[in-house]
Image (cartoon, grey):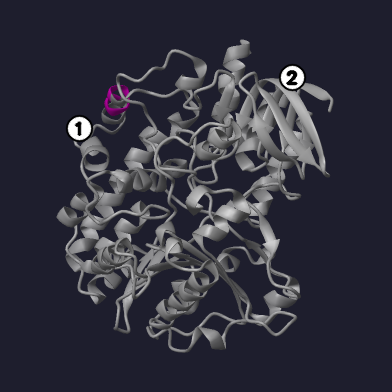
Amino acid sequence: MSTQHADVVIVGGGHNGLTAAAYLAGAGLSVRVLERLDEWGGAAVSQQTFDGVEARLSRYSYLVSLLPQKIIDDLSLPITLAKRRYSSYTPVPGENKGLLIDKEDEALTRESFAEIGAAEDCDAWNSFYDSTVALAQAMFPGVTDPLLTRSEARDHVTAVTGDSELWDRFIENPIGDTIERLFKNDVVRGVVLTDGLIGTFASNNDSNLDANKCFLYHVIGGGTGDWDVPIGGMGAVSGALLRAARDAGATLISGASVTAISGNKEVTFTQGGESHTIAARYVLVNAAPRELDALRGRPAQGPAPEGAQVKVNMVLKRLPKLRDSSLSPEAAFGGTFHINETWSQLQSGFDAAEAGSLPDPLPCEIYCHSLTDPSILSPELQESGAHTLTVFGLHAPHRLTQTRDNDALRRELQDAVVASLNSVLAEPLEDVLLRDAHGQLCIETKTTQDLEEALGLPGGNIFHGPLEWPFVEDDADVNNPEQRWGVATEDEGILLCGSGARRGGAVSGIAGHNAAMAVLEREGR
């Protein structure tokens, strides 16, 4: 077995690994990227999921908020992100009405608050989200800079916003407590809280502040908190990064399963039944920290990561009719469609899941990408009125897989998702699902175990592990480039460049950028 040599080996060809590769190869370093699968992009891919149905679904990750314009500009990425007119629609459980947040019609939004008996919450809503925008404008530009300490970050936020209480509201105090204090209506409270629960298993009044961290990353993206639809699907984002890395001179090796990383930065992998080794000066790991421990041959550090969601993809013949006949399906599905996500339902769902049961009803939120970007459908599907739906179900923690066969759990979760949707529809969802070339309904469900097996996400955790603040504590070591950029590991020269890095969650490229910057700082470039 011969040994190759490179300046940098990147383990994992997800969007972060490709981002790092583009920066480092562009700076003149020799870069090898090793990807286990034949397809590049990791979780940020577009795939034709159903046989004979020409719809390119964003199969795993699905929206973009945290991708900095700086990365797009630096790498000349031909990426278009489309904004959605409607922020969200939330039916009132058991009633034929709901809350519609229309970003282009303040009067209509105010009427919607009044319609569900939440008129007094409308001004509080506007004030609350004005404050999240202020927070975003203060914090988001710094995600591609070296880390600030907690005190430095707090002083910066206060200086930029002129609001001395903003930091405490979102960083120091449980976000659930803030929501309960500011809003009165059960539906309104739930809609606000959901941003703290995407991929995070936490109670409404989470004293550990895990929900706060999740909430923060969901509201600071782009300096606005908007979650946008990538034109062409998520694969267009990874495809642009793949081309950037290749054009910069990186060597891209697919079908390469990494089996070990030594302390002296030798990376061993198998490809086509043969074993290979690359000796590098730096190894960047676009895999979960727990996976890195395994590759280093040492015990895993800390508790096992736990995902907390079920992901369902569908293709419909048409959008379904709503129980709320006053609203068009195009408006309801034009933003985030929240189902059974009131404040009380979220807490009862958490309590049920913590006790080992499936929430009933299952809190769900829906995204219809094809309304914003029809290009992911073939012309024939577009003409027929077909649409895609992506469902993200909350409070489905990985611990449920410990007491159930995964196939049985997948069926149970899919049934729960369909039942949750049917509770707000005027017709059965099954009646509008498209069928594939084999006559099967176009619906696909992914459990946390499915995500672990397909993408190497420990426990199906979409963040590779617990989220961390986008700053470090005042007494943290920031003595070297890896620490300052939030990408350090126990091993010198081995860096995290994926979602497990600090500031690494979601489709952002931030972790890849920051790992590359740490290397370039080491290199004096």
Q: Position of residue 421 (x, y in %)?
A: 43, 78
Q: Position of residue 287 (x, y in %)?
A: 58, 39
Residue on which the image places disc 2: 28
- Could you tell me which residue is drawn at 61 percent across and 10 percent down? 524
Over which residues does the magenta segment extend?
Answer: 151-155
- Could you tell me which residue is drawn at 28 percent across and 28 percent down? 154
Position of residue 229 relative to residue 274, above or below, is below
- Could you tell me which residue is drawn at 62 percent across and 29 percent down? 284
For the residue marked with disc 2, what is the amino acid? Gly
Residue on which the image places disc 1: 164
Question: Majority secondary structure of the magenta segment?
Answer: helix
Q: Nearer the viewer, residue 288 or 3?
A: 3
* Secondary structure found at label 2: loop
Q: Position of residue 488 (x, y in %)?
A: 50, 24
Q: Position of residue 446 (x, y in %)?
A: 55, 64
Seen as rendered, the residue at the extreme top is 524
Position of residue 228 relative to residue 162, above or below, is below
* Secondary structure found at label 1: loop
